Amino acid sequence: MASGSGPVSALWTEINRCGQNGDFTRALKAVNKILYENKDDVTALCCKIVCLIQNGGFKEALNVINTHTKSLTSDMIGFEKAYCEYRLNRVEHALKTIQGIPEQTDKLKELERYDECLAVYKDLIRNSQDDYEEERKTNLSAVLAAQSTWENTSPEDLGLPESSYELCYNAACCLIGQGQLSQAMQKLQKAEELCRKSLAEDSDVTDEDVEAELAIIHSQMAYVMQLQGRTEDALQLYNQVIKLKPSDVGLLAVTANNIITINKDQNVFDSKKKVKLTSAEGVEHKLAKKQLQAIEINKALLAMYTNQADQCKKLLASQQAQSPGHPRPVLIQVAQLCREKQHNKAIELLQRFSDQHPESASGIKLTMAQLYLTQACDILKSIEEFKYKPGMISALVTMYTNEEDIDSAIDVFTQAIQHYQSEQPGSAIHLSLVREAANYKLKYGRKKEATSDLEQLWKQNTNDVHTLAQLISAYSLVDQDKAKALSKHLPSPDTMSFNVDVDELENSHGATYVRKKAAKVVGESHKFGDLFIFLYSGKLPKNYDPKSTPDPERWLPIRERSYYRGKKKGKKKEQVGRGTQGATSGGSAELDASKSASSPPTSPQPGSGTGTATSNAVPPRQQKPAVAGAARKKAPQKKKKGGKGGW
C-alpha cells in the first residue's frame, strides 16, 4: 500500500493514464508515491526519469540515474542518460555514454558528433520507415546549418524540402553561414509566414503564443540586419524579442549579447542590464561552446569599458584557461594594460604569446607595432631639447591622430601653449600654436574646448572678424547667451565692402562655371550682383543691358533704399453710414462731375464691390486675389414648426 493513497495498482493506472494524456507533472507525483514505498523499484525509477526529461528537468533526471547506478544499468537507461548529458551541453560525456552501450540502436546514432552525424542521418532517412521522418529531416537540416555556421564549410545540397518553418529556418541559417544575407532574409520571411500559417490552424494557440514561437526567427532576422550594417533596425527588433520575455534562456542570452555588441562602449547602462540575461541559469546548457566564448569575451570588454579592471582580468583568466591558444583574451588584456599606461607589460605579454603560439603571430605582431608607435610618441615627448619645437609638436599630433587618440594630441597642444605662455607670451609662435589648437579642436568637434583658444586670439586682435565668427559659432552650441553677446561686436553690413575681381574669380579653379570669353563686353566689368545671378541661374536676366549702370542699392530691401517714399495711399471709398447722420467721407469727390466724366466706364471685376479701374496692370503670377466685398447678410430663415433648434 502506498501511504494513504490507495493500492499501488491504482497508482500505476494513474501513471499510465497521465502518460497517454501528456500530463507528466501529475504522473511524476504518482511515481514518487510508489518510490516512497519502494525506493529501488526499477520500473518506477525509469518512469520518473522519463517524466523529468519530458518536463525539462535534465539535471534532476541525471541525478536519479547516477544515484541508482546499481539498479539502472547502461543498456537499460543509457539513451536517457546520454540525452540528458547532451541537453546539458556535456557533449563529450554523452558520446562516451553512447560508446559504452553494447547495442547501438537508431535512437543512439542520432546523438553523435556533427561531422559524423550527417552520414548517420542520411543512412537513417534512407533505411528507416516510421513516423519520425519529418523530425529527422529537420535535424539533418540543423546539422547542415551547424556545419555552415561553426565550421565555415559549404554544405552539400541534399534537396531537403522547405515544407515546415523549421526546415525553412535551418535553410536560412545555412545561407547566413555562407554569407548570402539577402537570400537568408527571404528564407526567414518565408519561415515566419509558414509559422503563422501553421499555428493559425490550432484554435488553442493565442497571439502571445505565436509571437513567442516567432521570437527565434525575429532574432535571426535582426542578426542578418546587423551583419548588413542596419544596426538601428536590428536593435529595434532585438528589443522587441527581449520585451516578449521568451522562456528560452538561450535565445534571450544570444539576443542580449548582440545588443551589447551594437552598444559597444556607448549606452553602457543598457548593456549592464542586458548582460544579466547572458548569465541566466541554464544558459550554459543551451548554447554552443563558441557562443559561450563570445558572450564571455563581451562581458570582459564591458567590464573594461566600465573601469572594472579586476572583473575584466578575472573573466580573461577564465577564458585563457579554457582556450589557451585563442588570441582574443590576450588582446583585451593588452588593451586593459594600455588603459593603465603599462605599455611595456603589454608588449612583453604580446611577445610571450607570439612565441608560444606562432599560428597567431601575424595579428599579434601588428598590435605590437601599434604599441611601439605609442612608445615612440612617449620617447619623442621625453626629449626636452625638442619637446616644444613646432616640428616636434606637428609630428606628435600627426602620430596621435593616426592612432585616433585625439585627447593625447590636444594634450600636446595644451602643454606647448602653456610653455610659450610663460616663456614668450604673445609671440608669433605662441599665437600660431593657439590658432592651430583651435582649428584642430573645431575639426574634431571639441567646440567647448576651442572657445578658450579663440577668445585668447580675439583679445589679441579684436578686429579679426574671422576669429570672432569662429568664436560665435563655437559658443552657439555651448552658451547661446555668450554667442549673442559676442555677436554685437560684429561689424555692420554697411562697413563691410567686397573688393572682388569678378573675372579673376570666375577663371579661378574654384569657379563652378566659367563664362566664355566671347560673352565678355569690352570695357565693362560685371558687378558682384550680376556674378551671383550668373552662377546661380546659369544665364543673365532677360532685361540685362550691359551699357546701363546697375542700381547700386538693388540688393537692399525696397523699404531700405534711399529713394523709397512709401506706398501712395489711394482715395478712400465712400463709407456710407459712418459718422453723424447725413455725413459722407468722400464728400466732394463724387459731386465733381468734371472728374468723373474723364474716366471711362469699366466692368467690375468678379468679387469686387466697385467698377473703378486700376492704373497699372499686374502680371497674372504676381496678381493678388481679389478681396471679396462685405459678406451679404443672409435672409433670416423661418424656423421649422415644432423645432427647437432651427434647420
Image (spheres, rainbow, N blue to C red):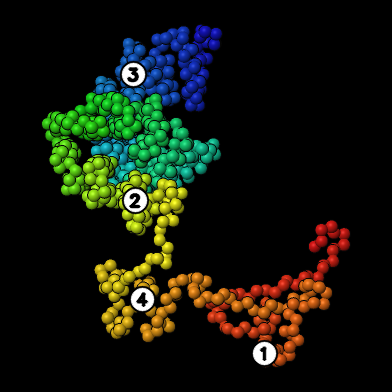
Label located before the other in sequence (4 or 2): 2
146 vs 387, nearest the viewer: 387
Q: Establish if 620 lies above or below 166.
A: below
Identify which amino acid the numbered label 2 is placed on: Lys
Q: Quadrant of residue 213?
A: top left
Mark 4 nearby-residue class (10 Å; few <14, some 14–19, many ≥20): some
In primary-sequence order, the first of circles 2 and 3 is: 3
Q: Residues within 10 Å of mark 1 (few under 14, many from 20)?
A: few
Q: Residue at x 44, y 8 (%)?
A: 38
Q: Which comes before the other along the chain, label 4 or label 3?
A: 3
Mark 2, residues whose alpha carbon is within 10 Å: few (<14), some, or many (≥20)?
few
> Which is closer to the viewer, label 1 or label 3?
1
Counting residues from the start of the chain, the first of labels 1 and 3 encountered is 3
Q: Nearer the viewer, residue 76 or 36?
A: 36
**Of the residues tagged 4 and 2, which is closer to the observer?**
2
Q: Mark 4 or mark 1, which has the lower sequence index?
A: 4
Q: Position of residue 297 (x, y in %)?
A: 29, 32
Look at discs 2 and 1 and give the one toward the viewer: 2
Cα distance between the residues tagged 4 and 3 = 103 Å
Residue 576 in view (yes/no)? yes
- Residue to which mark 2 is pinned: 459
What label sits on residue 527 in the rendered view?
Answer: 4
Between the C-alphas of marks 4 and 2, the distance is 36 Å
User: Which numbered marker is on residue 599?
Assistant: 1
- Residue with the mark numbered 3: 76
Image coordinates of residue 228 in percent, x first then y, are: 33, 48
Q: Please tell me which residue is depicted at 34% across the width and 32% down the height of the picture.
A: 306
